[in-house]
Image (cartoon, grey):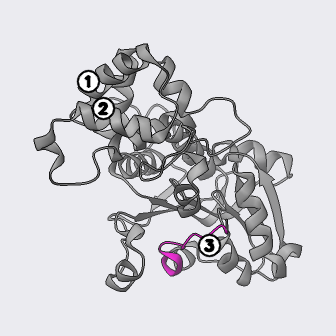
Amino acid sequence: MEFHHVSVLLQECIDGLCIKPDGIYVDGTTGGGGHSLEIAKHLTSGRLICIDQDLDAHAAAKQRLADHLDKITFVHDNFGNIGAVLDRLGIAQMDGMLMDIGVSSYQLDEAERGFSYQQDAPLDMRMDETKPFSAYDVVNTYSENDLNRVIFTYGEERWAKRIAQFIVAERTEHPIATTGALVDVIKKAIPKGARKDGPHPAKRTFQAIRIEVNGELNVLEKAIEQAAKRLSKGGRLCIITFHSLEDRLVKEAFRKQENPCICPPQFPVCMCGNQPTGKIITRKPIVPSKKELEGNHRSRSAKLRIFEGFGIKQ
């Protein structure tokens, strides 16, 4: 299957990065290479580091970026390890980094990856298929309390406790091995009257399990902390999120980087010595234009936040 993914907020990201032709840039979620291609087009003697944990994405991006391979270094890793990746490459600071958080259109559309509640497939949801831990493990081995926690916290699902109960009851009879089987359990758990309006009844639970499998929120927080400290003076960190949990995390993480002081408010001056790594550029997130929304319905929940580094040497 072709790795097809429409790049969300593409021009807004390119504008936000303020690309220098000789700069060093990182696409932490390369995917099919849409954002990477536009970054590469703006580089002359600069360098682009393309990171992705999905090997299918690497193969697709290398084809799409074929005319710019002399400017690009591909890295099979998670963007949460950005500090270690830069160290391995001998790069002290970068001039910009982009992260497009969440599941790609390809991953959703490729049934066998097990991300979609709209197609029956083995339960998987691993963004990095070389890792052993999958959605099957979450659904079939987590305790009822842990399932409730995951579904409620990461899916913001009001029926989390009931869904967890139904999953545990179902798996005592036989393992829940496919996305279709999980959808059936979720539909049984959510009262029919509550399923009339709104999104698909399985949407929030699938989101929650995907986040748990891939450790997405922990990875994102870790990546922001590392990336902010590795930005050059004026370097930009651009992050696109697709749901409220991610957006809140990015907003709060940027605030901590801008104002890291942990002194009690009654202290007249800062005594902790924590120094800001940069400043927030977007007090309110940038959202897709009406034209983009009409052309790509998957962009409807996208939000872009931008942070600018002070170039503090670590």
Mark 2 or mark 3: whose residue is earlier in sequence: 3
- The residue carrying pointer 2 sits among few (fewer than 14), some (14 to 19) or many (20 or more) residues within 10 Å by Cα, namely many
Give the SS element for disc 2. Answer: helix
With 312 as the anchor, is 271 left or right in this view?
left
Q: Name which residue lies at 36% across and 65% down.
A: 285
What residue span does the magenta drawing correspond to?
Answer: 2-12
Calculate the distance from the C-alpha at mark 2 to the C-alpha at mark 3.
33 Å
Residue 19 sits in quarter: bottom right
Front residue (pair 110, 40):
110
Q: Which amino acid does label 2 sit on?
A: Phe
**Is residue 314 in sight in this rendering?**
no
Q: Are marks 2 and 3 in contact (CB under 8 Å)?
A: no
Disc 2: which residue: 152
Disc 3: which residue: 35
Disc 1: which residue: 161
Q: Do the residues labelled 1 and 2 touch (CB within 8 Å)?
A: yes
Q: Do the residues labelled 1 and 3 touch (CB within 8 Å)?
A: no
Calculate the distance from the C-alpha at mark 1 to the C-alpha at mark 3.
39 Å
Mark 1 or mark 3: whose residue is earlier in sequence: 3
